[in-house]
Image: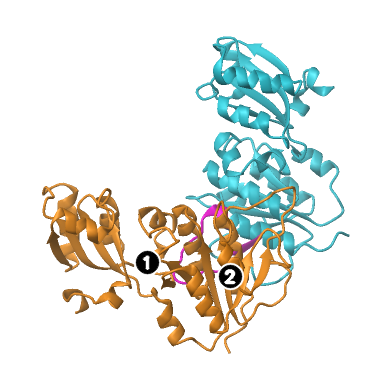
Chain colours: A cyan, B orange
Amino acid sequence: MSQFRKPDRQERRRFLTVYGRKAVLEALADRQMDCRILHLASSNRSGGVLQDILDAARAKGLECREHSREELARISRNGRQDQGVALDVYCPAMRELDDYLAALPAAPQRLLALDGVTNPQNMGMVIRSAAAAGIDGVLYADRGNPALGPLVIKASAGTVFRAPLLRCQTLFQASKSLCQNGFALYRLQSRGTRTLFDGQKFADRALFVLGGESDGISRELSELPGENLSIPMANGVESLNVAVSGALVAYVAATQKPAKA
Amino acid sequence: MSQFRKPDRQERRRFLTVYGRKAVLEALADRQMDCRILHLASSNRSGGVLQDILDAARAKGLECREHSREELARISRNGRQDQGVALDVYCPAMRELDDYLAALPAAPQRLLALDGVTNPQNMGMVIRSAAAAGIDGVLYADRGNPALGPLVIKASAGTVFRAPLLRCQTLFQASKSLCQNGFALYRLQSRGTRTLFDGQKFADRALFVLGGESDGISRELSELPGENLSIPMANGVESLNVAVSGALVAYVAATQKPAKA
């Protein structure tokens, strides 16, 4: 079984690592989560919650590995908050954008990207809404998106582990690749040439980009060919929370999606 | 001018009271807010932020009143957190549900109610989204909704002061009154007889009710005649954040609203 050999780099990109004693214990208790390897710091004192974690991992037949404190911090990527415990979780719906593009479905596609969204709570809430709406993929950039840590996981209500995340290096490179593969780019802006609710159709292959809380969409992404969409606002309201805009875009995009070709 | 006489009870219901030094100073600096009376505890020490507050209030020509600590706590309704400072803000779009019903417009109406939503952040975010969407009124019950304090104000990004809030005693009584005035009741439930996105029309007069974070819609409201609406969810996602559901309902309801009769 795959959990008993060392995953190669490509495989590792399909895992998310949960850290912290409470988060790991909760993950082990969640039957929907495909937990694989438990990592422990050799400096951990035994007993208490740690014993509960070990018991839960053993009951699931998981491999448990011990590491030096420094090596564990490298695995969790957050030595300050991992409390000596990390857990690899397999995410069946997460993959590399390149793999997605290599086998691009003929059916209409709706993708979502969050450009410069730094608030983990907003990131988590949008992932949850996008997964619920049936968006085909949410871009998740190594640089530019917050790490999928405890705050994102909590705000996503755990959906991050089964959301269709498409991993990429940067959103700009990913957007360019998608455009080259026939995707139309729709940028959410305060001033758009059309509104999200005008009932017009979107292209069969559509990438929707939302900007961050303070700076909006980055300049380089603004300069790619594409259309600017706005969300109409009444009563002098100047903006919506990113999590709210993301949910509106996800549901409108997904529900206006043509039936599969 | 009205700010120099004591408002009667009906008038007072069109005011929200901001409290706490930082919140009051921010309100005084906001040109969109119609600040009326500054209330101070006589026990306050002068200087510092308090002097900034007094300066800002005087620059606006506001009436400043001094009260005993106990009387100020009665005005702020939060003696623990008011820091000896409260500010009455006039909310032009807020009114009694009874007054709204007494002059019910002939044009189609879209109202929103949050039943048992206790999280102030969710309440504030829904008010912001509903105001932006152009919902005709958000019910605001004295019993059952969180007080419109600093957390609601912050989450609403200040829109609470210009949102079309309809004040009522309880949501159940309000919903009954609305039904008697020809409103159809649409309850958001996990299992609905139709979905929010099925493209079917809603009644000209429509009240949409969302349930709270944990207990959903109360039993008495569930037993009123009405229709159950659901939001479709993919990928095994079981629920959405209330703030997200509220925004989806607000925008779908407002954008599906027939043109004015």
Q: In which quarter of the image is residue A244?
A: bottom right
Which x, y percent locates residue B214? 56, 51
Task: Locate residue A137 relative to residue B180 in the image: left or right.
Answer: right
Secondary structure under tag 2 reads: strand
From this view, report whether residue B69 is shown above or below residue B254.
Answer: above
Q: Name the residue under label 1.
A: B161
Question: Is the residue at mark 2 from the same chain as the one at mark 1?
Answer: yes
Q: Can see residue A231?
A: no
Q: Is residue B174 in view?
A: yes
Q: Which residue is drawn at 11% across and 49% down?
A: B46
Q: Name the residue under label 2.
A: B208
In magenta, the rendered stretch is A226-244
Q: In this view, does B195 lie above or below A161?
A: below
Q: Where is residue B246 in the image (x, y as percent from the top left)?
A: 56, 62
- Asked whether, in this view, residue A17 is left or right of residue B139, the answer is right
Residue beneath the point at 51% across and 70% down: B172
Name the residue located 85 percent from the left edge and 55 percent from the top edge.
Answer: A107
In the rendered structure, the answer to whether residue B79 lies left or right of residue B203 reads left
Q: Residue at x 61, y 44 (%)?
A: A156
* Quadrant of the drawing holding the N terminus of chain A: top right
Instruction: Give the percent coordinates (x, y) of residue B109.
Output: 55, 80
Q: Is mark 1 on a helix, strand or loop?
A: helix
Q: Which chain carries label 2?
A: B
What amino acid is at disc 1?
A: Phe
Residue placed most toward the observer, B109 or B74: B74
Q: Which of A162 and A224 is in front in this view?
A: A162
